[in-house]
Image (tube, rainbow, N blue to C red):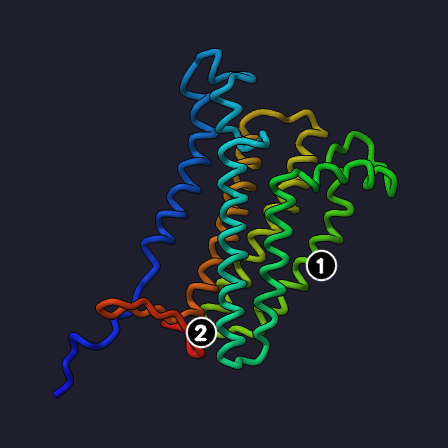
Amino acid sequence: MVDVTECPAPVRLRRVGWWLLGVSVVLNVLSMAIPALVDHPLTTERGEVRVYFDVFSEGNLPTWWSVGLLVLTATAHAVTGALAAAAKVRGAWAWFVSAVVLGALSLDDHTSLHERLERVGQAWVTFERFPGYWLIPGVLAGLLVATALGLLAVRLTGATRWCMVTGLALLLGSALGMELVQGLLVAEGESGPLYVLVLHAEELGENLGVLLMLTAAARSLAITRDADRLSVRYAVTPPS
C-alpha cells in the first residue's frame, strides 16, 4: 500500500493570479472614481491624491504597479527558461528572449521612453493636429516585440500558447491601438468621458496582457510540496 501522505502535493497559483488581477482592476477603477466621486482640491485637477492614482500620470502608484507586473513576469520567464534549459527542452532560449523583452518594456514604462520618441516621429512624417507621433517609431518597436514574444508562443502548446498569444495581442493592441485612438480623440478636441474610458481601457488591457504572459510561465512549471521541501521543475506537459 502506498502512503499518500508522502506523495508531493501540487501547488496551485490561481489565488495569486486572482489577487494580481484584482489589484489591477481596483487601481484602474480608483483612477476613474476618485475625481468623479470626491469633489476636493486634492482629488480634482492636479490635486495630489488624483495625480497619485491617475493612470494618465507617470511616476505614481499605477505606474509602479505596471512596472512591477512586467518585472515579475520577466523574472518568471527567465526562471522558466533556466528550468527548461536544465531539463534540456528544445527552444528553451525563447523564454530568455521573452524575459529580456519584458524587462525592456518595464524600463520603458518606468522611464516613459516611448513618449520621448515624439520628436523622432515628427521628423519622419507630419500630420495636422495629431499628438501621438511616438506611435510611428513605436509601431516598428511593436513589430520587434511581437516577433520576439512570438518566438516563444509558437513553441508552446494548448492553453499555455493561447495565454501567451492573447497576452501579446492585449499588450500591443492596448499600447499601440488605444494610444492611436486617444491621439485621434485629442485631435478632434475630445477630452471627456470617452477619452477617459479609452485611456483606462489601455492601461487595464496592458496589465491583463502581462498577467496572461505570467500565466503562460506559471502553466509551464510543475510546483510540488511535501513535508519540508518545495520543488519546481519545467512541465513538459502543461497542467490542464
- The image position of residue 183, as x and y in percent, is 69, 35
The residue under label 2 is 234
Question: 10 Å neighbourhood of mark 2: few (<14), some, or many (≥20)?
Answer: many
Name the disc covering residue 144, or none.
1
Q: Is residue 180 left or right of residue 76?
A: right
Asked whether residue 194 appears in the rendered view, the answer is no
| Quarter of the figure with the C terminus | bottom left
- The image position of residue 176, as x and y in percent, is 66, 46
- Mark 1, mark 2: which one is toward the viewer? 2
Q: Residue at x 25, y 74 (%)?
A: 8
Q: Residue at x 32, y 54 (%)?
A: 15
In 3D space, how far apart are the residues under numbered discs 1 and 2 (Cα atoms)?
27 Å
Q: Amino acid at mark 2?
A: Tyr
Question: 10 Å neighbourhood of mark 1: few (<14), some, or many (≥20)?
Answer: few
Name the disc covering residue 79, or none.
none
Q: Residue at x 63, y 64 (%)?
A: 97
- The image position of residue 83, as x and y in percent, is 48, 72
Q: Is residue 207 left or right of residue 187?
A: left
| Quarter of the figure with the N terminus | bottom left
Q: Is residue 230 left or right of residue 218?
A: left
Between discs 1 and 2, the one toward the N terminus: 1
Q: Residue furthest left?
A: 1
User: 176 or 193: nearer the eye?
Assistant: 176
Q: Residue furthest front?
A: 228
**Image height of 92 relative to 22, above or below:** below
Q: How many marks?
A: 2
Q: Are marks 1 and 2 in contact (CB under 8 Å)?
A: no
